[in-house]
Amino acid sequence: MSMIETHDVTKSYRSGEGVMEILHGVSLSIPAGQCAFIVGPSGSGKSTLLHLIGAMDQPTKGRVVIDGQDLTKMTEPQKDLFRRDKIGIIFQAFNLVGNLTALENVLVPFLPRGITPELRDRAKAMLTKVGLGHRLTHRPIQMSGGEQQRVAIARALVKNPQVVLADEPTGQLDTRTGEDVFRILRELQRELGTTLVVVTHDRRFIQPQDLVLEIEDGLLKK
Ligand SMILES: Nc1ncnc2c1ncn2[C@@H]1O[C@H](COP(=O)(O)OP(=O)(O)OP(=O)(O)O)[C@@H](O)[C@H]1O
Ligand SMILES: [Mg+2]
């Protein structure tokens, strides 16, 4: 069964002189539990596509269907709930809250609903899984880049989302640290059966069983 589908998706932006089309009709299908990579040159539309899949933005035309649900038919509040429950997001710049500890950062998405003791235990277990059991009370400034990104991975995965989206998750890390961080992400993805979509310039992480989607000038290469 496919977890992620896009059907002839276009995305245009209105700029000073007129309308600029960035994605020119992208159709793709990513099976549940798959690790998929979106690769392509800078400016080709990779992040734009990832944002559409993550319900962070909407297509100009076409449909985005996640787990059988058509995002383009949802209201904004419905999309917010959908994102909260089903989608974990990891950014290049970690995006941790500076004055919160590692543990608090992992719990941040749950704040509006209240933090139960079970949740706190799950967050601790997830931080231990990413190798940060000894860093629970450290703040971002007291952690290395690789450690911060592992906190961000724990934050994205603690709710056991069906889909995890990562935009250049190792882009700010040195080669060795990037490999370690990516290995942890992949281990968790396998263990939880998550569908993982990674935007990257770096093809080193791609394994034979992965799905590779190459995008160029807003079109998928066949
Ligand atoms: N909000 C916006 N308004 C206008 N143009 C935009 C907007 N967001 C992105 N673009 C344009 O869309 C194109 C694709 O951008 P996108 O961020 O998807 O590229 P990318 O493939 O992720 O590149 P990179 O590898 O550099 O991150 C770029 O030319 C960019 O300038
Ligand atoms: Mg990008």
Image (spheres, helix red, strand yellow):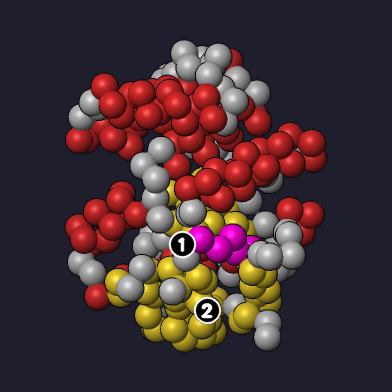
The number of callouts visible is 2
- For mark 1, give the secondary structure: helix
Q: Nearer the viewer, residue 35 or 139?
A: 35
Find residue 26 and report its horizontal and vertical position in percent: 53, 81
Q: Are marks 1 and 2 in contact (CB under 8 Å)?
A: no
Quadrant in which the N terminus is drawn:
bottom left
Q: Of the residues shown, which amino acid type is indicated by label 2? A: Leu
Establish if 42 lies above or below 72: above
Q: Is residue 43 visible?
A: no
Find residue 181 and report its horizontal and vertical position in percent: 66, 38
Residue 28 image label: 2
Side of 98 where 118 appears, left or right: left
Q: Is mark 1 within 8 Å of ligand 1?
A: yes
Q: Which residues are magenta?
A: 33-37
Q: Which of the 4 image quadrants contains residue 125?
A: top left
Determine if the magenta segment contains residue 32. Answer: no
Q: Which residue is mark 1?
A: 51
**Badge 1: how crowded within 10 Å, few (<14), some, or many (20+)?**
some
Q: Nearer the viewer, mark 1 or mark 2?
A: 2
Side of 1 where 117 appears, left or right: left
Residue occupying image coordinates x 65% and y 31%: 146
Quadrant in which the C terminus is drawn:
bottom right
Residue occupying image coordinates x 44% and y 36%: 155
Q: Mark 1 and mark 2: span between their CA atoms?
A: 15 Å
Dot placed on the residue nearer the N-terminal end, 1 or 2: 2
Residue occupying image coordinates x 56% and y 22%: 132
Residue occupying image coordinates x 62% and y 80%: 220
Determine if the magenta segment contains residue 34. Answer: yes
Q: Nearer the viewer, residue 41 or 188?
A: 188
- For mark 2, give the secondary structure: strand
Q: Is mark 2 within 8 Å of ligand 1?
A: no
- Residue sitting at the far front: 191
